[in-house]
Image (cartoon, rainbow, N blue to C red):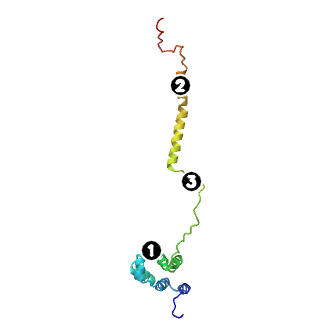
Amino acid sequence: MGGGRETDADTSTRLNNGDSIGARLRAAREQRGLSAENVAKQLRLDVAVVNALENDDRERLPAPIFVQGYLRSYARLLGLPENELANDYARESGELPPLTVQRIGQRKTFFRLPSAGLIRNIILVLFVAITLWLAFPYISDLFDSRNDVSDGEAVPGRLEIPPAGH
C-alpha cells in the first residue's frame, strides 16, 4: 500500500474484522476526514456522546434505546450498515436486537367502510322513505276523500245554495 487512498473494500474489510462498534465508527469517521465535533454537530449530539460511542464507554451513554438511535444515525452519516451496528450493540449490551421493519407493499382490503357522511346520507334517505311509506295510506285517503265529491252530489255537512232564480 504505497500511501494511496484506502478503497471502500479495504475499509469494509478493516471494519468487519472484529473491531468494537466504537472502533468501527471512529475508523469510518477518520477515513472520511470528519472530526468528532463535525459529526456531533451534524447529528445534533454532544461531542461527549460521540466520544463515548467511539470509545465504547457505556457508562457515559444514555439508555440503550437512545444509543441504538444514535448508532443508526451515526452509521447512516458514515455510510455504514445501520441495522448491523444496532444489532451488534444490542448483542454486546445483552439486549434483544431491535426488530427491523420491512415494507412489503400496501395491504389490500376486501371491504372498506364508507365515510361517515355517506352513512349519514343513507340513513336520512331510509328515514324519509320509511316515513313516506308509513304515511302513504293516510295521504292517499286524504286525496281520495276530496276527489270522491262530484259536482252534483250533496255532501253531508255542506250547505247547498240553490241557483238564483228558482
Left or right, 46 with respect to 14, comes to: left
Is 137 situated above or below 161? below
- Observer-nearest of 95 and 115: 115
- Observer-nearest of 34 and 88: 34
Q: Earlier in the sequence, mark 2 or mark 1?
A: 1
Q: Residues within 10 Å of mark 2 (few under 14, many from 20)?
A: few
Three-letter code for the amino acid on which mark 3 is drawn:
Arg
**Image spot of residue 154 (x, y percent):** 52, 13
Front: mark 3 or 2:
2
Q: Earlier in the sequence, mark 3 or mark 1?
A: 1
Pointer 1 residue: 66
Pointer 3 residue: 112
Left or right, 134 with respect to 34, comes to: right
Q: Residues within 10 Å of mark 3 (few under 14, many from 20)?
A: few
Pointer 2 residue: 143
Quarter of the picture holding the N terminus: bottom right
Going 52% across and 91% down the picture, which residue do you hit? 4
Q: Earlier in the sequence, mark 3 or mark 2?
A: 3
Label total for image: 3
**Image spot of residue 148 (x, y percent):** 55, 20
Judge whether residue 144 can be spotted in this image: yes
Furthest toward the front, the residue is 165
Going 54% across and 36% down the picture, which residue do you hit? 130
Three-letter code for the amino acid on which mark 1 is drawn:
Phe
